[in-house]
Amino acid sequence: MATVDECRVALRKLGEQFDELDQESRARHVVDRSISCHISDLGVTFYGRIHHGGLGPFDDLPPGDARSANVKLTIGSDDLIALVNGELDMGRAVFGGRVKVDASFGDLMRLRKLL
């Protein structure tokens, strides 16, 4: 099981990977959304935003009611690390039940194009 600090580092790395996306992809697929990422085995939730300027930063202090996030992810700590390191495919993880995504259909379609 990964630690909370390792999860913070992974989310920061995910933001850096998002920064590598070309501007055209961002313009087509990114809509400003709040995101919560619940790490199920650690019982901690990180909060952040996805926007044209980037992803994150993530913080473990809620900006308000956590249920108000537009996109909610639930993932285990080791799966988060594997996902960010390219060792776990997001599509397979979702369909295999290792990652749960709670978002509108439109947000799901946009995220699919970005991940």
Image: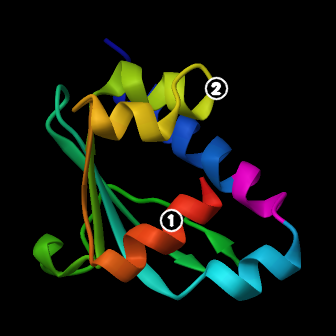
Question: In terms of image quadrants, where is residue 25?
Answer: bottom right
| Mark 1, other Cα within 10 Å: few <14 / some 14–19 / many ≥20 | some
Range covered by the magenta-colored residues? 16-21
Residue located beneath label 2 in the image: 85
The residue lying at 37 percent from left, 32 percent from top is: 93
Out of 17 and 3, give the one closest to the viewer: 17
Residue located beneath label 1 in the image: 111
The furthest residue to the top: 1
* Residue 23 in the figure: left or right of residue 49: right
Q: Identify the element where label 1 is drawn.
A: helix
Residue type at tag 2:
Asn
The residue lying at 16 percent from left, 71 percent from top is: 66
Q: Earlier in the sequence, mark 1 or mark 2?
A: 2
Percent of width and height locating residue 33: 43, 82
Q: How is the image coloured?
A: rainbow
Residue type at tag 1:
Leu
* Residue 87 in the figure: left or right of residue 106: right
